[in-house]
Image (cartoon, rainbow, N blue to C red):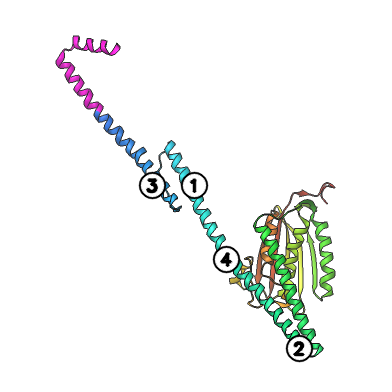
Amino acid sequence: MFTLMLLYLLFSWVGFKGIGIFFAVLLITKEIVQFFFLLRLETRIFEPMKNVKQGLDEVAKGNYGIKIEYDKPNDLGFLISSFNEMTAKLSESEKLKAEYEENRKALIANISHDLKTPITAIQGYIEALLDGTATSAAHKASYLKTIHQNSIYVNKLIDDLFLFSKLDMQKLDFHYEDVSIRAFMGDLMEEYRFDLEERNIQVEYTVQVAADYCIKLDGKRFHQAFNNLINNAVQHGPETGLSIQVKLYRQNNFVCLDIKDNGPGIPEDKLPFIFDRFYRIETERPKGFASTGLGLAITKELVEAQGGKVTVSSLKNVGTCFTIMLPILHSKESESCQ
């Protein structure tokens, strides 16, 4: 009714000719406005939506590297930004999956090789004993010693594999306690001092912390990590004159432990890889057949699982220093810190 009344007034005041011109101008203006509106809609909505559809098709094909360019601060812009974040995460996940698959294949190949070598040796020496090839008592004792060493190696490899697989699947149980680091390390070093000095290995333990600090620690798991570093120094150190220095000190908000030896050192080009699983500096196993190539990888995983980190520095013909860094909870102030 309101519209009809307006039309009646226009016809009354202006006449039919004026009304025609008015409507012509109105229609032209409307078409121009609609054209620019649709053009803007095309560039800001329809074209980006088409790109999103194409992007989803690419994702469905497994191409996660796609990215849509759109910089308008509107709801569609937020949608496209979320799409780009999703594809970036999917791409990263795909890379990790590919790396994991490669690592799995390498792990299986390394396990096969590391198990086959000692088992073949065990089989060969047992056959020699059964065939009567070893006639003297000395030969028999030598064969049995080699069989024993290889069986120890296989058993240790299986233990390390079991521990590492639990760490890799995040299924290893940790039992944390608030621990006084000075008391804990004092007891630990007494154990090692007695054992290593019996093997003519010089041990020096230095405490350079002004106060005692409380840290959250799983003592059993930390002992495994620390033991791997000590064994690494023993296995790769000189036959005689080996010296191991352990130093406890504070650095910023961390308690640090240096485990330093006077061994041959690690070549600079091999330092970045020593924490990789099954990585060995030598192609031959070190003395004692004890190295599985998993010790340092396990140490890294165990320390990081407790909120810490482990680093290494080395100089050729001078020695190697591993550093364990553990976050400080607080200074020891209560009996709850054991």
What is the magenta range? 1-30
Q: Which residue is mark 1?
A: 86
Q: Position of residue 251 (x, y in %)?
A: 70, 56
The amino acid sitting under disc 3 is: Gln
Q: Residue at x 73, y 69 (%)?
A: 156
Which residue is found at the position 80% from the left and 74% from the top?
201
Dot placed on the residue nearer the N-terminal end, 4 or 2: 4
- The residue that label 4 is drawn on is 105
Amino acid type of the residue that numbered disc 4 sits on in the rendered structure: Lys
Tell me the CA gap for discs 3 and 1: 15 Å
Q: Which residue is mark 2?
A: 132
Graded by Cα atoms within 10 Å as few (under 14), some (14 to 19) or many (20 or more), the crowding at tag 1 reads some
Measure how far apart labels 3 and 2 are at the Cα level: 75 Å
Mark 3 vs 1, N-terminal side: 3
In this rendering, does residue 73 appear at all? no
Numbered tag placed on residue 54 in the rendering: 3
Q: Quadrant of residue 184?
A: bottom right
